């Protein structure tokens, strides 16, 4: 079985991380934009304007929080992968420090 160089694995990890983060940003923008449309219609109804805005604020906060958590988990996973790759590199390179 052919070994993949650690540098290539790091590159793949970076590409995956960038793709997940970019996809998360795009999905968040799309979801917030789509959710805004019905709220824009409903807040034109005077008796319910205030509660509609409150519900939208809660939904927006939850959405931003969920996507923020996805970003955090992605960054944490990438950091763990970096440490694992560091260990792998040290174990295969006798000149590596540590």
Image: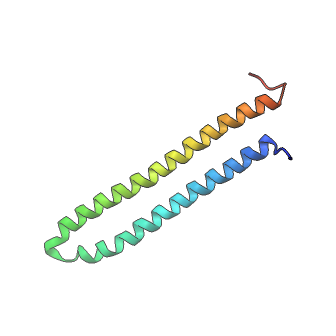
* Residue 79 lies in quadrant: top right
Furthest-left residue in view?
A: 47
Residue closest to the eye, 31 or 84: 84
Location of residue 56 in the rendering, given as x and y in whole percent from the top left corner: 29, 64
Which residue is rendered at x = 45% and y = 50% of the image? 68
- Position of 17 compared to 38: left or right? right
Image quarter where the C terminus lies is: top right
Location of residue 39 in the rendering, given as x and y in whole percent from the top left corner: 29, 72
- Position of 84 compared to 24: left or right? right
Furthest-front residue in view?
A: 1
Furthest-top residue in view?
A: 98
- Position of 41 compared to 75: left or right? left
Is 50 above or below relative to 89? Answer: below
* Residue 85 lies in quadrant: top right
Is 32 above or below relative to 1? Answer: below
Residue closest to the eye, 54 or 74: 74
Location of residue 3 in the rendering, given as x and y in whole percent from the top left corner: 84, 44
Which residue is rendered at x = 66% and y = 38% of the image? 82
Q: How is the image coloured?
A: rainbow
- Position of 83 compared to 69: left or right? right
Number of numbered discs: 0
Residue closest to the eye, 40 or 81: 81
Location of residue 49 in the rendering, given as x and y in whole percent from the top left corner: 19, 70
Which residue is rendered at x = 65% and y = 53% of the image? 16
Which residue is rendered at x = 57% and y = 58% of the image? 22
């Amino acid at each position: 079985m052919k070994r993949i160089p650690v540098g290539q694995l790091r590159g793949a990890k970076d590409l995956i991380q960038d793709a997940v983060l970019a996809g998360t940003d795009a999905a968040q923008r799309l979801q917030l934009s789509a959710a805004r449309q019905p709220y824009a219609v409903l807040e034109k109804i005077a008796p319910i304007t205030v509660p509609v805005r409150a519900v939208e604020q809660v939904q927006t906060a939850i959405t931003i929080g969920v996507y923020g958590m996805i970003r955090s988990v992605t960054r944490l996973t990438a950091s763990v992968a970096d440490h694992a790759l560091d260990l792998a590199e040290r174990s295969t390179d006798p000149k590596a420090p540590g």
